[in-house]
Every structure is written in structure tokens, then in C-alpha cells.
Image: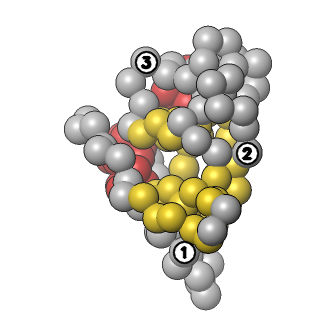
Amino acid sequence: MMTSEAFNFAVGEQDLALVTKEDFDACNTADPLLVFQQPGDYIFQSEGMYYLTCTFAGHCAKGQKIALYFAPSGGSPSPSPAAGQSQSQSADDAAAVKFVSKKEYGFKKLMPGTMKSL
């Protein structure tokens, strides 16, 4: 399963941060799993729930956040993870996101950023 989503935002005015469910719910961006400073296409390589927001002051609180769920291809959706499992699920999600930057002469694939240990 690979799904691509495009995120467009003004560099220096916004960013895209992958966070745990708990941090997403609380709009806590002090310790995100990954932060992308550039807009572009993001490839999600596995099914599951991804929690994304912006680390700039006040942006999350104003609603600038999104939870994305990618169902397994060809099957019925699995139940959402239990509350105790959500942090490890988010760590798995962080490892499954790649950034693909749109460049004038095609695509340039970048390795995923270093994931912070939980």
C-alpha cells in the first residue's frame, strides 16, 4: 500500500508535523515525531492512522490539523488501536512516511527524517 497526499503551505509561515494521537488531541507540538519544513507530496507506505499538524504557535489550536486514516487495500478496515497502543502506532507511522519534493525537473526522493524514540 502506498498513498500520496499533497501538502501545500508557505515556507517559513507553516510546516507539517507528524505527532502522536495524545499530542494531536492536546495540540502539543513540543516534541513531534517528524517535522517537514517544505511543501510537497508525502507518501504513506502503510495503512493506519496518521496525525498531522503545524508547530507554529497557535496554528493547531486554530484547527490547522488533520487525522488521516489509510485502510488496508483490498480488505475491510481494522479497528482503531487501543489508547495504550496509540503511541507505538504513531512511531510505526513515522517510519512509514516519505517526503517527495516537487522540483522543476521531476521528483527528488528524500530519506525520512530521524525518528525520535518514544
Question: Is disc 2 surrounded by few (<14), some (14 to 19) or many (20+) residues within 10 Å?
Answer: few
Q: Nearer the viewer, mark 2 or mark 1?
A: 2
Image location of residue 66, percent across then percent down = 68, 41
Q: Secondary structure at mark 1?
A: loop
Q: Which residue is mark 3?
A: 30
Q: Please report contact status of discs 2 and 1: CB closer than 8 Å, yes or no.
A: no
Residue lying furthest front: 105
Question: What's under tag 2, amino acid-wise?
Answer: Asn
Residue 104: give its label: none
Give percent across and percent down for residue 103: 62, 60
Corner quadrant of residue 100: bottom right
For disc 1, the marked residue is 2
Residue 10 sits above or below residue 82 on the image: above
In this orientation, which residue lies closer to the viewer: 20 or 43? 43
> Considering depth in this image, is 28 or 37 the residue closer to the camera?
37
Q: Position of residue 6 (x, y in %)?
A: 70, 56
Q: Which residue is denoted by mark 2 in the rendering?
A: 8
